[in-house]
Amino acid sequence: MSQITLQMNSFTEENYLKAIYKLLENETVVTTNAIAEKMNTKAASVTDMLKKLSDKKLINYQKYQGVSLTAKGEKVALMIIRKHRLWEMFLVEKLSFKWDEVHDVAEQLEHIDSDKLIAQIDKFLNYPKFDPHGDPIPDANGKFQLQKSVPLSSLKLSEHCIMTGVVDHSSAFLQYLDKSGIVLGNDIKIKEVIAFDKSLQIAVNKKNTLFISNEVAKNILVIIK
Amino acid sequence: MSQITLQMNSFTEENYLKAIYKLLENETVVTTNAIAEKMNTKAASVTDMLKKLSDKKLINYQKYQGVSLTAKGEKVALMIIRKHRLWEMFLVEKLSFKWDEVHDVAEQLEHIDSDKLIAQIDKFLNYPKFDPHGDPIPDANGKFQLQKSVPLSSLKLSEHCIMTGVVDHSSAFLQYLDKSGIVLGNDIKIKEVIAFDKSLQIAVNKKNTLFISNEVAKNILVIIK
DNA sequence: ATTATTTTTTAGACTAATCTAAATTTAATT
DNA sequence: AATTAAATTTAGATTAGTCTAAAAAATAAT
């Protein structure tokens, strides 16, 4: 049986590209040592991989000069991040994982290779734009929703928003949200801002009115509608 | 950082164990060549792996004598089969994959390592006992449903079952089944029982509705879901 | 019961990803 | 500008999994 060798990237290559992508969010060029630290490996191993990724035209690399991603490399990285975040969403929304339990499993699931699978998961979740940590989920073309999440505490009176994530992942906080019926994707409107302590009166999904402290509001991430 | 070497099996080891398990369903001992063929590899590679699996006490192996699984090896194989079949079920039931589209993806998903994940998928699917092909799904202890087949004619209204075999093996009957599109492993639901002659209206695979006589129903063996 | 054939194993080599230790290049400091 | 320190790369090994070709064992056939 003939086996088409479709230019696939190994798990390891994918992980390097993802690490480089994340490091590039802060810097314009990333160093060998930074990658080694992030990947929990040694600089010599990184150098070897950089040559390989460079040969495959996934990164821009000149000896001793650090690396950046090519358009092709960035696309690959974004698709992995897309898969990672969609799987995290799936685990939380459909399989009742806690927000702090999903990472290790998503690290594995992000490498599953099936366009149909990820398209169906996306659909099953109703095309979420943010993952449970409030991070944006790139679409199938690698484009992000251009709005980024902000703390609920930064909103003004009568502003309208959608809950996208949390800052504090402690189970104490998550349990509080649970008890209060505040769930990812909820529509939240600021009904009153108490000047004294910056506590808020909010309407959740246009009916459930409740009071939350500024401390809580600072830990809830939202996008403004 | 100290890395605990938790006796994990690689993807490759898992695939060998699964292949051996499947070959053992027909034979009491399996040969190097049979494994090579199933794994799409060469006999020499198989020999190397057999030594490794034997060292890990996952198989019983004596040079030139073929192999069988140890209790430990069988447990590992069963857990992979469990994961494979649960994932297939998930893909078909929740993500609207067709039966013939699920295999390749399930081959990847079966190696994801997370007890919680598989427990939750099982729960999410409401603890199915059979996969979309009618194959039984081992439980978390590696036990299969030891339910015995009964004639379809013994079921009550709206009961749900899986076709497992026939009583009458005549070619006339088998041709009738073929023509009616009733295949081993099919999901069958009793939609109506005609009191007068005990004939049935059934839904095959949740869509294909047809009428069968009591005579036919007596000759179709099923297990109740 | 020998010989021929098939099956299985060994020997030696290859690739991907990693490592340590040494060499080289760049950056920082006097 | 010269020297020291830090970062990076090279050289050479290692491990998992694979391969080809040759050797050894088991099976089949005369």
Image (spheres, coloured by chain):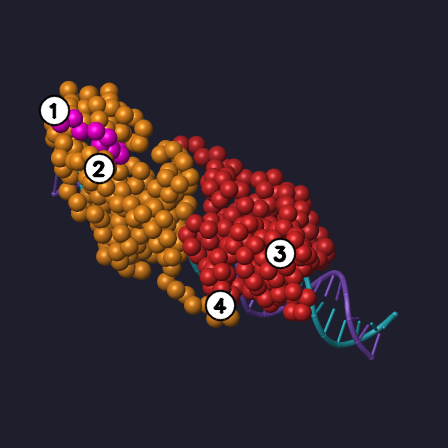
Chain colours: A red, B orange, C purple, D cyan
Q: Decide: marks 4, 2 in contact (CB < 8 A)?
A: no
What chain letter is assigned to the residue under label 3? A
Please give the residue where the numbered disc 4 appears in the rendered image: A172
Residue type of the residue flagged with mark 4: Ala
Closer to the eye: label 1 or 3: 3
Closer to the eye: label 4 or 1: 1
Q: What stretch is highlighted in magenta?
A: B183-195
Residue type of the residue flagged with mark 1: Phe
Residues at marks 2 and 1, CA–CA distance in whole angstroms:
19 Å
User: Is B21 positioned to the left or the right of A213 in the image?
Assistant: left
Q: Does the magenta stretch include residue A214?
A: no
Q: Nearer the viewer, residue B202 or A89?
A: B202
Please give the residue where the numbered disc 1 appears in the rendered image: B196
Residues at marks 4 and 1, CA–CA distance in whole angstroms:
63 Å
Q: What element carries label 1?
A: loop
Which quadrant is home to the N terminus of chain A?
top left
The tag earlier along the polypeptide, 3 or 4, is: 4
